[in-house]
Image: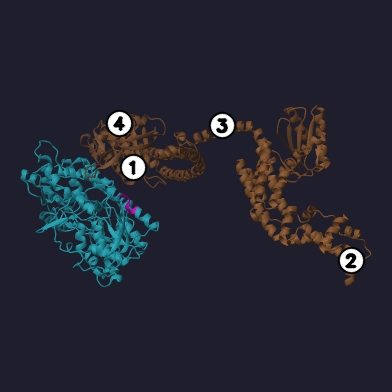
Amino acid sequence: MNRFARQKSFYKILLMFVIAISMPAISIGYLAMNFSTAHIIRQADVSSTILLNEKKLYMERQISELVYLSNQIIASDEVWKLFEPNETYPEQAEAMSGVLRFFDKIVSSNKHVASLYLINKTKNYVLSDAKYSLDNFYDPEVLKVDVQGDYTVLPPRTGGAIGASNRSLVSLLRTFRNVYSGESMEVAVNIDYRDFSESLEQTRGMASPMNLLIFDDRDRLILNHSGIEERLLRDQLTQMRNADGTSINRTFGNTDYYLSMTRSDALGWTIVYSQPYEQVVDSTRLLRRVLLSTVLIVLSISLVMAGLFSFYLYRPLAQLVADIRRRTNPASGKGKDEYAMIGSAVNTLYQQNRELQSQFDMAYPYIKQHSVFELLSGKVWDEEKLGAVIQLLGISLHKPHYVVAVLDFENTELTDRVIGDIEAFFLECEESMLLSIMSERRLVAIVNSERDKNELIDLFNRLKLRLNRGDAELTISVSKIFDSLDKLFLAYQEALQLLNHKFFVGKNEMIVSETIRPIVDRGAFYPKQQEQNLLESIRSQNAEKAAAALASLTGTLTELSYSIDYIKYVIFQVCSNLMDALSEVGGKPEEAGIDVQTLWKDIHEADTLTRLEALIARFIHDCMETAAVLKRKQHTETIAKTMDFIERHYREDLSLKEISTNVYLSPGYLSTIFKNETGMTIYDYITQVRMKAAGHLVLDPDVKIQDVALAVGYNNIQSFMRFFKKAYKMTPLEYRRSRKTIG
Amino acid sequence: MPNTYKKVMLVAIAASVLAGCSSNGNSESSVKPSSSSSPSPSSSSTASPASAEASKEAPTTLKLAVIEMYPGVSFDNKTTHYIEEKTNTKLEITAIPGADFENKLQIMLASGDKPDIIQLGTDALEMKFTKSGLLLPLNASFDKTPNLQKFGEDGIWDAMKHSDGNVYAIPIRGSAIDNIPIYRKDWLDKLGLKVPTTIDEYYAVADAFSNKDPDGNGKKDTYALSGWTANGGFDLSTSDQVFGAYGTLPNSWLLQDGKLVWGSIVPGALDALKFLNKMYKGKMIDPEFVTDNSARFKDKVLKGVIGAPVYRYFLMDSSNLNNYYEPLKQNNPNAEFVEGGILKGPGDSVGFRMLTRRGWLKTAVLNSSPHVDAALRVLDFLASDEGNKYMNYGEEGVDYKVEGDLLTKTITDDQMKQEGIGQLRLAFNALYDQTSPRYRELFDYAHKIGYKDPADGLVVENNTKQVELDQYTGQQYVKMIMSDGPIDNMFADYVAEWKKRGGDALTQAFNDAYQEKNKQ
């Protein structure tokens, strides 16, 4: 029952199929069966009528033969002899004897005629096979018959001459008159009922005898081969005689009979061909059976098919409903059929969708904004997410060039009209564009285009002119062209930086990198000096100083009340610069587990400043480690490089900074490692190299000492003299002389 | 040489046979089934050893076309099966109703449907078939069919013999004579008369029977004689005693000086007619004899109307053969008949006409039969004592019992029919074992006083004239018997007319046949 309730629709579908298939099949079967019976009945009626008429004609012919025979008898000489006034007994006897002989001749030569009677009631005799008187005639029944009309056919009766076995006879009784005396006489022609009935039974082309029932107008049975008991027939004969049509159905006993009827007016007989109804429609039965089995086969096949169809049609439905049930409150599906459930589920979904849609519509600008922020802030890195965001924004960005422009409105706040103007403008120019309102006065436009930078700048110029005409003053900074959105963040930063130049350029201008003096100290928008300090302390492996520099940096950032994102950005920028710096001197940050992406991600995910500081501290630590490794690997080389640099440039006015820059180390660090490696300071080494060279140069007696000093990098002769005296324990001249002596 | 009288007798015999037989008789053979002490016919070439072994072989199928003895009774019964078993055959029997028998048979043969065994009614048809070479000469194989040979030893085969010396048909046999002069003994006693021995005594008895109210009812309702119409003519065999007393029998052949003479036209016949005319005038002959038939005649005899005719001695058989005795006693318990002898008259008296020995029905085997041996086997078996007894009475202890020399049927006639006893009469000899000793006494007596037709066994092809002549004779006789005046001229006219109508030619034909047969 539960199962039924739950699979109501299955049964509905099944029922529908079953009805759709079985109704035509059943009605066709029913009609065919019905009509087959009607058809058979009609055929039976036709054939029965034909047979009956044949029988009727046959009977009438038989009877008319009897009439003819009776006429022959009446007209015979022998009978006419009786008419004569035979006065003597021998004459009478002879005349009667003549009739008897005549009769005998007829009877013996006509096998259908069983006997003949000549009845003279007036004179009290009957001539048959012998002469009888009325009272001793063996067939008294005939004598009782009152003949009406020319002749009467008597119903069968049993009778027989004396000494002969009884026979069943059918008699034709005909009256005539003695032409002389006028006395009435009768001739009876008796035929053997068995012959009569057998001849009626035989029917051409029929295997079984015809079951005939014949009765006269007085409801006397002439023939009953119907197989129906006489007593059953008795009271229905009148009705049957008066029935209309050629056939009727009657029930006798417990059997239905199909009765075909005809009437012989000549005989006054009703002739009925009785067939058990079952027998008549017997052939229908076969037909019916065929039809029935056909219908049943069709039905059963159809039902199986219907079951299969229903099953296959129902299965997705059932799965759908099962899904719905699983996903919704089971109670809500109770008492509902599958369609109702699907209906309500669709309804619910539709409503939810509408709700979501309206919510989304409301949220969309924010989402869009946010998404652009996300893009601009570089938070979206991986391609998938990027695609999703772009899809969300609903623009196609497939052209090769991107450019980011930051629009600062100077004298007005952003209005929808202005935004509309801008959007319209880009639409006119057939450029894909994303607008993001960053603040009340600031707008960021990301343009995806095929145009080159100049064309794009021109484009923005035109936009600016257009907006200017609308009395809006605005400053636009345009980033460099970039070719993929993952560079958007940097481009945006660049644009922002460029916009910062507004300070220098003035308001209501276009600012592009080409028109701007490049910023010497990159990242001037944050305390660059502190970054330098930090880098320096890392290079110098001074952890305490690095920590202090970091604290100072973050302190500055927090004091300046930058947004957290900005702080993070700065931090990242610092870190990334640090990494760059390390890379420049051959450091490999990867080896310390540092890479830009991870770093950005970590920074981005840092939720507190403390954590950020810890992160940076670890980063710095890692960098210092890297630097330490680097240092160890590079000291010798660095020293060699430094010495080489010095030996090549000792003639110039060398500063420590120049030298340290040459080996990408800070001057202090270089000094330190140089002293550690060589045991002397760089200045000592420079002096040593210069003195060595001066020692050679001074030997040339043609050269002035002053020139030697210049040649080895001393602008000040006193300094040279002092350093020479210190190196050679003598003045240059003294050294020249002493060498001469030796030489 | 059939004639009207004989035909009448044939009918009578047929009736008696049909009515079945009561019983009595020695019947060991039928009780023992197949061990068959009877000389088993066989001889069938296929079954040379013994019939018992023959039965082991596949039964031969024989087709039979026979007269319908029991209308509506199937041949699928114990008697048929008994015959089949005994003869190792399978019988396919077509029964043809008597009325249409010969026509149907001829049509059947002409249609190419040839049975093995057929039955014939008339001599004419037998002649016809013999001339067409259809029938098998039975005597040729008598050595193989001893029972059959025995069947006709007492002159039957002589009567059946054709001019070529062959026997082609087996007659179905009954008593050769049923009619003898009989007298109402109770009337004789009442009137103080004796059974007459001369024609004059007969006249006295007839007069007393007719006019002295022998039944004592005070009415003139008794007669000595009557007669009946038959086949369109008059049957006067009931007054054979009168004709016999005058040395003739009407419608029968007399042998005078080695020649056959027709008994109706001899002078003795005129004398007898004069005597009868006198009786008629003296109201000793029932005037209705002109318009009565045999049944009405019998009825009148049984009811005590006729007292001194020539009629069935069945009336004296207390076993009620053919239902004469009991109705007589029912009508009048005192009624009793006694037999008389040949009346002495002015001429050489002759006895009473007998039935032809050629039988009312004959059985023959068709030449064309592929199973001649089997067919003869069947006929031989039925001709045997065992077979004939079975066909007469059925199975002893079941269908009849024997006490002393009296055989009593233990089943009704109807049961007998259903069992097929007497149904297939191919070589049938009616037995009278069931009748009373008195009957058998009379049987012998009747045969003693019977008149043996010298022409019996003569077959003359064209006998159609004879029927017409017999009818003419009958009519003229009636006229003469009933005539008011003298009849001499009438008789002379009749004789002349008879001769003219073909009587001479017929006489010549019979004499020729007689001479030829006697030559052999």
Q: Label 3 is placed on what type of residue? A: Gln
The residue that label 4 is drawn on is A235
Q: Label 2 is placed on what type of residue? A: Arg
Q: Is residue A78 above or below residue B315?
A: above
Q: Is label 1 on the same chain as label 4?
A: yes
Quadrant position of residue A633? bottom right
Q: Chain of mark 1?
A: A
Q: What are the residue bounds of the magenta stretch?
A: B99-103
The chain drawn brown is chain what? A
Q: CA distance from mark 1 to mark 2?
A: 185 Å
The residue that label 1 is drawn on is A197
Residue B264 location (% of width, % of height):
24, 52
Residue A535 location (% of width, % of height):
70, 49
Q: Chain of mark 4?
A: A
Give the quadrant of the N terminus of chain A. top left
Residue A378 location (% of width, % of height):
68, 43
Sequence-first disc among 1 and 4:
1
Q: CA distance from mark 1 to mark 4?
A: 23 Å
Q: Is residue B136 above or below residue A527?
A: below
Residue A349 location (% of width, % of height):
55, 34
Whether pointer 4 and pointer 3 mark residues with C-beta atoms closer than 8 Å, the reply is: no
Question: Is the stretch drawn in magenta largely helix, strand or loop?
Answer: helix
Q: Is residue B313 above or below residue A48?
A: below
The residue that label 2 is drawn on is A736
Label 3, residues with CA under 10 Å away: few <14, some 14-19, many ≥20: few
Q: Nearer the viewer, residue A85 or B396?
A: B396
Sequence-first disc among 4 and 3:
4
A22 left or right, relative to A650: left
The chain drawn cyan is chain what? B
